[in-house]
Image (cartoon, helix red, strand yellow):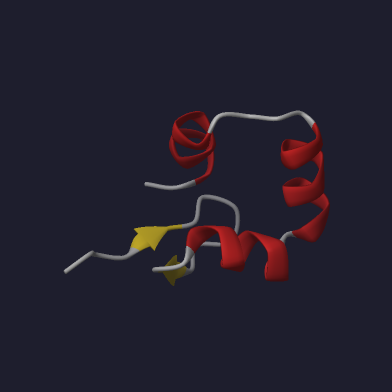
Amino acid sequence: MFGKAKCKVCGDEVRLTLKHFSDKHKDIYDAEVAGKLKMSDFMRKYFD
């Protein structure tokens, strides 16, 4: 099974990282999607 990742922005522990970001951090999510950031870079930048 997969573990939880800790969000560096708010400190929540989540399993569905993209859903968490699209729901709780919409402004950051929209900017990153528009910038076409790679998923691996996104995970390193925002999650432990």
Residue 47, position as x, y percentages in the image: 45, 47
Residue at (53% x, 44% y) in the render? 46
**In the foreground, 2 or 46:** 2
Q: Relative to residue 11, is residue 25 drawn left or right?
A: right
Q: Is residue 8 above or below residue 10?
A: above
Q: Position of residue 39 (x, y in %)?
A: 51, 37
Q: Position of residue 4 (x, y in %)?
A: 31, 65
Left or right of residue 21, residue 29 in this image:
right
Q: Looking at this view, is 30 or 5 the one in front?
A: 30
Total number of numbered discs in the rendering: 0
Quadrant occupied by the N terminus = bottom left
**Residue furthest left in the image:** 1
Q: Relative to 15, is 37 on the left or the right? A: right
Which residue sits at x=54%, y=37%? Answer: 42
Please state if 17 lies on the left or on the right of 33 as rendered: left
Please tell me which residue is depicted at 78% across the width and 59% down the height of the picture.
Answer: 26
Q: Nearer the viewer, residue 21 or 34?
A: 34
**Image spot of residue 36 (x, y percent):** 70, 30
